[in-house]
Image: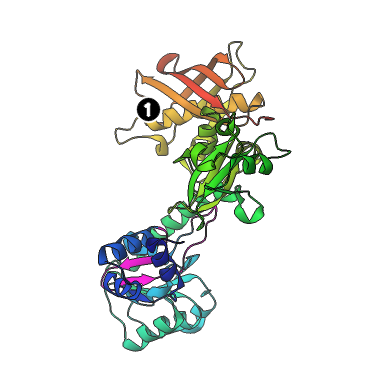
């Protein structure tokens, strides 16, 4: 039977998007204390069922689906540009794809307005209405207000009308940066893209099942971990062969399961999860949401397969990409190991006009990763990097990077890296890294 807490969450989830709720109203409807209602509403906010908006209140919103791309929404803009909501608050969870500056005639603007776009305007009600009628949200700059008719239309269309005191140029710059950051996030592979959901036949067990049930479920499978859930789908434990070894067939799984097991969230990066699984010799991890509802499982083989298939092409917009673009391999390579050259650019400098310590670290990272990639080791994760800088490196200097492998085995590598300019040692690094490789187990 579902708990009161779960019943309240189910009730909130059944409300229409845009419904305003309060602790008092939920407590009265569900016949619970206000404290119980408050805790459930806070969890609903954490899981994306509701949102609390200043001067509006707590409203039921469209819950964002789990995916490998954390979309930029209109709600995210509120804090980014210090905006407030004038109308259409039920549409704050909608995705923002692009923005249009309303500095043209309505006929000209119409060509550029698309669904999921944002029209940035001042006190032009004709442009505001045109945007809403064509599926776009509105951002009013300069602190201007709008009419009740526009706000009424925004509420009908579930499209936000936002207001900010910033000028058009400033908010356009800020939003453009946010969209650029979002494009980078799209290249980061997360667990959401590779895990096996419950709907694909993931087997689960209940606490009152037995060891004999576990044995039956794992028949014909060499490596098997069984998530144990409540009748409502909340994860409460994991059972593996190790837990049931030597136990009677009638023993309840509740007595042998590992309680509070290690879990992963869909938004975690695949590389970080692979590091954890290899370091702890874990073959299967349960995937849960923020309220511990089981979503599925992820296996170590699927993590390594995903890492092996990652493309090497990128958008060239991250600091790592910009550093890599300036690295050149020295040929033929010295006998002790590979060597590279780097020509410093203004982007790499700190405020004192010398090479940034962070850029030095990225240079070391790139050098080792490149060397191991050429040796067929595709998935490299730096564990420790001890970097010592001895001399400042000036703008437009040429840095020579020498990589000396100290020890490389099937799972780890240790390297000594030297950075020189004009024949003088400017920095030295000792690096250890993990090599995340697919296993056959």
Quarter holding residue 302 = top right
How many residues crowd around disc 1 within 10 Å: few (fewer than 14), some, or many (20 or more)?
some
Q: Which residues lie in the magenta part?
A: 47-70
Specify whether residue 64 is painted magenta: yes
Q: Position of residue 432 (x, y in %)?
A: 49, 21
Residue 13 vs 338, above or below: the answer is below
Q: Residue at x 36, y 66 (%)?
A: 51
Q: Quadrant of the C terminus?
A: top right
Q: How is the image coloured?
A: rainbow
Q: Which SS does the magenta portion mostly show?
A: loop
Q: Residue at x 31, y 60 (%)?
A: 39
Q: Position of residue 116 (x, y in %)?
A: 50, 70
Q: Residue at x 48, y 25 (%)?
A: 364
Residue 262 left/right relative to 395? right
The residue beneath circle 1 is 394
Count of picture labels: 1
Specify whether residue 202 is painted magenta: no
Q: Position of residue 126 (x, y in %)?
A: 40, 86
Q: Nearer the viewer, residue 234 or 79?
A: 234
Residue 237 left/right relative to 284? left
Residue 10 vs 221, above or below: the answer is below
Residue 219 vs 48, above or below: the answer is above
Quarter holding residue 60 = bottom left
Q: Residue furthest bottom?
A: 149
Q: Nearer the viewer, residue 270 or 401?
A: 270
Residue 351 vs 141, above or below: the answer is above
């Amino acid at each position: 039977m579902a708990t009161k807490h779960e019943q309240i969450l189910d009730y909130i989830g059944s409300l229409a998007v845009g419904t305003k709720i309060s602790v008092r109203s939920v407590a009265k409807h569900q016949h619970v204390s206000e404290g119980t209602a408050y805790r459930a509403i806070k969890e609903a906010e954490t899981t994306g069922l509701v949102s609390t908006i200043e001067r509006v209140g707590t409203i039921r919103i469209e819950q964002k689906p789990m995916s490998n791309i954390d979309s930029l929404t209109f709600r995210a803009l509120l804090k980014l540009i210090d905006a407030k909501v004038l109308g259409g608050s039920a549409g704050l969870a909608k995705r923002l794809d692009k923005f249009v500056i309303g500095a043209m005639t309505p006929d000209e603007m119409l060509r550029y307005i698309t669904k999921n776009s944002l029209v940035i305007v001042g006190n032009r009600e004709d442009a505001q209405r045109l945007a809403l009628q064509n599926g776009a949200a509105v951002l009013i700059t300069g602190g201007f207000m709008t009419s009740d008719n526009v706000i009424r239309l925004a509420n009908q269309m579930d499209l936000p009308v936002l207001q900010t005191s910033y000028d058009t140029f400033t908010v356009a710059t800020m939003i453009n940066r946010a969209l650029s950051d979002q494009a980078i996030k799209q290249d980061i592979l997360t667990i959401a893209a590779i895990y096996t959901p419950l709907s694909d036949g993931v087997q689960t067990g209940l606490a009152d099942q037995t060891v004999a049930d576990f044995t039956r479920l794992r028949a014909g499978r060499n490596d098997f971990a069984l998530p144990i859930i409540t009748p409502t789908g909340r994860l409460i434990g994991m059972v593996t062969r190790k837990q049931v070894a030597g136990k009677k067939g009638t023993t309840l799984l509740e007595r042998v399961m590992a309680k509070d097991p290690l879990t992963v969230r869909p938004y975690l990066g695949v590389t970080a999860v692979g590091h954890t699984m290899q370091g702890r010799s874990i073959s299967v991890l349960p995937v849960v949401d923020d309220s511990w509802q089981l979503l599925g499982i992820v296996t170590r083989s699927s993590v390594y397969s995903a890492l092996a298939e990652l493309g090497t092409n990128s958008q060239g917009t991250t600091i790592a990409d910009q550093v890599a673009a300036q690295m050149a391999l020295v040929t033929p390579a010295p006998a002790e190991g590979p060597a590279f050259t780097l020509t410093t650019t203004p982007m790499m400098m700190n405020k004192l006009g010398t090479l940034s310590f962070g850029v030095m670290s990225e240079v070391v990272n790139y050098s080792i990763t490149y060397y191991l990639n050429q040796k067929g080791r595709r998935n490299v994760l730096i564990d420790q990097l001890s970097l010592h800088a001895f001399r400042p490196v000036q703008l437009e200097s040429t840095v020579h990077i020498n990589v000396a492998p100290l020890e490389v085995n099937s799972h780890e590598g240790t390297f000594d890296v030297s950075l020189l300019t004009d024949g003088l040692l400017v920095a030295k690094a000792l690096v250890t890294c993990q090599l995340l490789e697919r296993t056959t187990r």
